[in-house]
């Protein structure tokens, strides 16, 4: 049996679900600013559900969500707080829980066309410096292009902590998986291996496109004799268009039950994914289903 790590679920939607202050454009950062106890509560819900790896609530600690002035004034402190809160909850857990420091898209999710490498680096550096004392590893989230990967890796390559890179996929199924930029997943995996990534993941895309991404990734890893892990944390959204405006409206949800999500997860594990959790709209009940299933694996 392959090892399996249960990742947490989507922080933003869980904050909204439990009644935290939550509005655009601040999104999940609003709770850090106004009511950080809700962030602690959300982390706790995922840990109680069985998560063994939680991601800090720093996804919205960027100028895209905070605005330039608030990021300049409080970006470091808010990202630092996200690390402190996650570390505190993890250290109090009844089972071993690792903390991943989130490095989000600096210029908004799902829009590789808006990425600016040189402007991104100081933003990433701020998030890195703020969270480094409190995290066990790094999770670079929702990478949509090879250019994004390279720019962020330039900052993280100085870290002595494991670096996990999570790529967001086009929500259209096909014979080969692609990033939202249209670039091939196989090229992304090659770049990650060359950069000494500890794991490659696919996140914030519909579950239907994950299987092909795992297959493509496995092919490259076999060719390169690499043993880095593959992870999946899909969202519970309807497919996202290439012109998505992340701060305009909340993305439309679908009805994907914990049992539905588990069907996908079992297939991902069978194909070689060893880190499985959820992204936007995947809540503690979904993570509990994954955790309960993992128990059945260990009993076999």
Image (cartoon, rainbow, N blue to C red):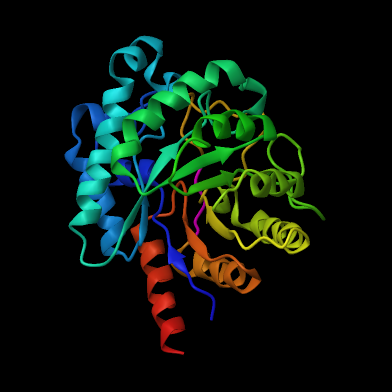
Residue stretch in magenta:
252-256
Q: Viewer-proximal residue, 30 or 59?
A: 59
Q: Viewer-proximal residue, 194 or 299?
A: 194
Residue 19 in sight from this viewpoint: no
Residue shown at 43% from the left, 18% from the top: 63
Residue 26 in sight from this viewpoint: yes
Query: Where residue 211 sits: x, y (%)?
Result: 67, 61
Residue shown at 36% from the left, 67% from the top: 288
| Res 232 → quadrant | bottom right
The residue lying furthest to the bottom in this view is 300
Query: Where residue 272 sits: x, y (%)?
Result: 62, 68
Query: Where residue 51 sits: x, y (%)?
Result: 35, 61
Query: What kind of secondary structure does the magenta stretch mostly adopt?
Result: loop
Query: Where residue 122 sits: x, y (%)?
Result: 47, 19
The magenta stretch spans residue 185: no
Residue shown at 34% from the left, 59% from the top: 284
């Amino acid at each position: 049996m392959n090892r399996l790590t249960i990742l947490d679920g989507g922080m933003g939607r869980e904050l909204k679900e439990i009644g935290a202050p939550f509005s655009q454009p601040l999104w999940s950062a609003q709770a850090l600013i106004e009511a950080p106890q809700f962030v602690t509560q959300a982390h706790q819900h995922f840990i109680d559900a069985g998560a063994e790896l939680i991601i800090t609530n720093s996804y919205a600690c960027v100028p895209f969500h905070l605005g330039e002035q608030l990021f300049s004034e409080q970006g470091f402190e808010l990202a630092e707080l996200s690390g402190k809160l996650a570390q505190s909850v993890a250290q109090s857990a009844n089972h071993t829980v690792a903390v991943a420091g989130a490095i989000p898209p600096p210029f908004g999710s799902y829009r590789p066309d808006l990425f600016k490498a040189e402007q991104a680096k100081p933003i990433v550096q701020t998030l890195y410096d703020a969270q480094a004392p409190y995290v066990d590893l790094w999770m670079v989230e929702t990478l949509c292009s090879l250019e994004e990967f390279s720019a962020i890796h330039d900052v993280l390559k100085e870290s002595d902590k494991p670096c996990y890179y999570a790529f967001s996929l086009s929500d259209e199924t096909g014979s080969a998986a692609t990033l939202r930029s249209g670039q091939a997943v196989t090229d992304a995996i090659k770049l990650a291996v060359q950069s000494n990534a500890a794991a490659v993941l696919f996140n914030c895309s519909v579950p239907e496109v994950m299987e092909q991404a795992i297959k493509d990734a496995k092919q490259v890893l076999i060719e390169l004799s690499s043993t880095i892990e593959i992870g999946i944390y899909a969202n519970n959204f309807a497919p996202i268009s290439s012109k998505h405006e992340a701060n305009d409206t909340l993305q439309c949800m679908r009805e994907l039950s914990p049992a539905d999500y588990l069907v996908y997860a079992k297939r991902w594990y069978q194909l070689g994914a060893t880190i499985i959790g959820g992204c936007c709209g995947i809540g503690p009940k979904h993570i509990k289903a994954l955790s309960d299933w993992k128990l059945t694996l260990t009993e076999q």
